[in-house]
Every structure is written in C-alpha cells, then in structure tokens.
Amino acid sequence: MMMDLVGKYREMKRRGEKVTALTAYDYPTARLLDESGIDVILVGDSLGMVVLGYEDTTLVTLEEMLHHTRAVARGVKSALVVGDMPIHTFETPEQAVATAKQFIDAGAQGVKLEGGVSHAAHIEAITDAGIPYMAHIGMLPQHVREQGGYKVKGKTQSEAEALIADAKAVEKAGAFSVVLEIVVPEIAKQITNAIGIPTIGIGSGEQCDGQILVTHDLIGLFPWFTPKFVSPEARVADEIRKAARAFIERTRASDLSKRSGG
C-alpha cells in the first residue's frame, strides 16, 4: 500500500490536482467528511485543544489518540485516515515504528509525526516497515512551549534553508506528502517546487499542492480561538447555542403552561 500511495500522491502533484485534508475526531464528523469527498482525514493531536480542552497539544496521550482514531475509522470508506503521533511517542526509531503500528491497528492507514532532518531516521524506520507516512514541518505545535508561541517560520534565510532541507529529508525518507504549517508563503512555494511529493499547507499560502485545516476552525465550532489564516465556512457554534436556547425556552414554556392550567 505504501508504495502505491507515494506514487498516487506524486502523480496528483504532477497533474496539478490539489490535495484536500481536514481533521476529524469522531464517527459522525468523519463520516460526513468522507461523504463530502475529502482526500485525507487527519485524526490530529489538535484533538487535545478543540475536543478535550487542553491548553495545547502536548498533553494529549497515545491512548486518547488511539481511542479517537478507532471512532474515525468506523465512519470512513474512501478517504485516507492518518493518525497523528503525539509527543513523546517517537523518541527513537524503534518506538516510532511501535507507535505507528498501534495507529494502523486502530484503523488508520497512515501516520504523521512532527519533524524533518532531526527525525529522518524515525521516518525511514516507519516507511521501511511499510507504513505510509505524512510529514509535518514548519511551525510544530508539539514544540510551541519552547518556541514561545505559534510563530511564522521561514522569515530568515537560515530558517528557509533549514525548511527546504527538512522537506528534502522527509521526501528521501519515504513520506508521501508534507504538511507546511505557518510557513512564509514564498518559502512554501520554494519548498513546493523543490520536492516531488505534495506540500499540504496550513496558513502557508495558496502555492502549496494542497490545504489542510482543523475542521472545528473551518466550521466555526471552536469560537474561543480562530487562527488568523482561517475564514470559517460556517458558524456551527452559533447554531448550537441557538438550538439549545430554543430547547430551553420551549421546555420552560411548556412547564409554565402546565402550571397555569393552559
């Protein structure tokens, strides 16, 4: 499957066919996205923030990720399900493979982990095991604390050169695609032109080979924080509040009617 997948995504890039990807953490969302024709469904460690209420993604556990991966897998027939390997679950190449296998056992068809050159050996171990791998470079949410926040990457020449080196390293290690998170658009374009696998941007401009978003951001389901680069297509949070208030009013009105004998 892995070699077929790498070939498929290289061919999509060659044809100029954009890759579409969104996150899901539960059965109904996954099923709806799959029915919509999305290419990739990522069970992202963003689960920790938009579903579990953690401060950032560093608190998500492997057990939580596997639990939600199983739920997502039950709802998908066509899209590629990718499991996001949480922090501290790929400290060595051996651990990376063991973790990746747990995601496959949970129903994922591929895995993602953050890092480039520094994790080339880990990535190669995963792909050598026959497990499809999606790379992730640029702003790395699992390192947000040490990086001092969610900052744009590629502003300096040294950063840009490092990002290009990361992209080439993950391609060489066998990745079928690479997520570019909050990378200067011009640098994202350079990376896109420098490698043969698709770049999937998030906050990195329109020149990437595809785009990915956190579904909660796209549909307005997490109104307490929306990234600057997101333009929500819906306001689901408003609809939930509206429905809940209507239910409350209807229930209380019914109770009042009974009390008054109406």
Image: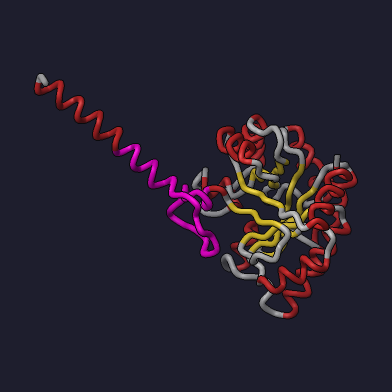
Where, by quadrant of the figure, is residue 83 drawn? top right
Q: Quick check: 64 left or right of 176?
A: left
Residue drawn at x 87%, y 43% as measured from the top left: 4
Q: Quick check: 94 left or right of 61?
A: right
**Up-down relation of residue 201 to residue 252 (above or below):** below
Residue drawn at x 62%, y 67% as measured from the top left: 147
x and y percent of residue 91 in the render? 77, 52
How is the structure coloured here? Answer: secondary structure
Where, by quadrant of the figure, is residue 201 drawn? bottom right
User: What segment is highlighted magenta in the picture?
Assistant: 216-245
In the current view of this chain or complex, which residue is farthest to the left?
A: 260
Q: Is residue 3 something that shows in the picture?
A: yes
Q: Quick check: 160 left or right of 170?
A: left
Residue drawn at x 70%, y 62% as measured from the top left: 180
x and y percent of residue 203 in the render? 61, 63
Q: Is residue 122 something that shows in the picture?
A: no
